[in-house]
Amino acid sequence: MLAWLDLLEGRPGDALESVRGALAKTAGRMTDLIAPHIPVTQLLTGAEALGGLGGAERAGTAARLVGAYDALRKPHYHRESAVERTGRERTEAAARAELGDAAYQRAYAEGTGLTLEEAAALL
């Protein structure tokens, strides 16, 4: 939540730090059992923060994180909110604009094969 607010206030660097802290706090069996969507959603917030910081390398990482988000999200368990959907759309559009379609697709495809832990390590 704090990371999302940081994004709304135009502070992607702070948002990235907030996501890192949130991922560290939510890692564990209890989250896996009760709210497994939380760290997956944090990946998307981290991707948007990276996109806000700019640059091709960060855009590639953002694309990987979007791929991981799409692959790890369980739609039957957690329905994507309007905030998540629009954040995802913004993140994809920014990464595609920076990378081009082919490079975006390659990075996205790499992300779909990541575990939650591997994706979180990109942040």
Image (spheres, grey):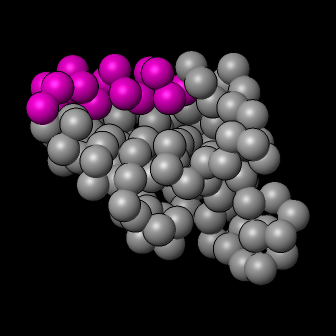
Q: Does residue 26 show up?
A: yes
Residue 93 colored magenta? yes
Residue at 49 percent of width and 50 percent of height: 71
Q: Residue furthest front?
A: 76
Badge count? 0
Query: Can you give x and y, in whole percent of width and height, for residue 28 in the image?
Result: 73, 78
Query: Can you give x and y, in whole percent of width and height, for residue 74 in the image?
Result: 66, 48
Query: Does 121 sit above or below residue 17?
Result: below
Query: Can you give x and y, in whole percent of width and height, for residue 117 in the image?
Result: 50, 72
Residue 56 colored magenta? no
Q: Which residues lie in the magenta part?
A: 87-102
Residue at 35 percent of width and 53 percent of height: 111
Q: Quadrant of the N terminus?
A: top right
Q: Quadrant of the C terminus?
A: bottom left
Q: Residue furthest right?
A: 34
Residue 90 occupies quadrant: top left
Query: Does 87 sit above or below residue 58?
Result: above
Q: Does residue 61 show up?
A: no
In the visual, does 41 lie left or right of 47? Answer: right
Q: As rendered, which of 119 and 9 lies closer to the eye? A: 119
Residue 85 occupies quadrant: top right
Query: Does 118 sit above or below residue 29?
Result: above
Query: Can you give x and y, in whole percent of width and height, for residue 14 in the image?
Result: 52, 46
Residue at 69 percent of width and 32 percent of height: 80
In the visual, does 42 lie left or right of 116? Answer: right
Q: Residue furthest bottom?
A: 29
Residue at 34 percent of width and 20 percent of height: 93
- Chief secondary structure of the magenta portion: helix
In the visual, does 56 lie left or right of 76? Answer: left
Query: Does 75 sit above or below residue 89?
Result: below
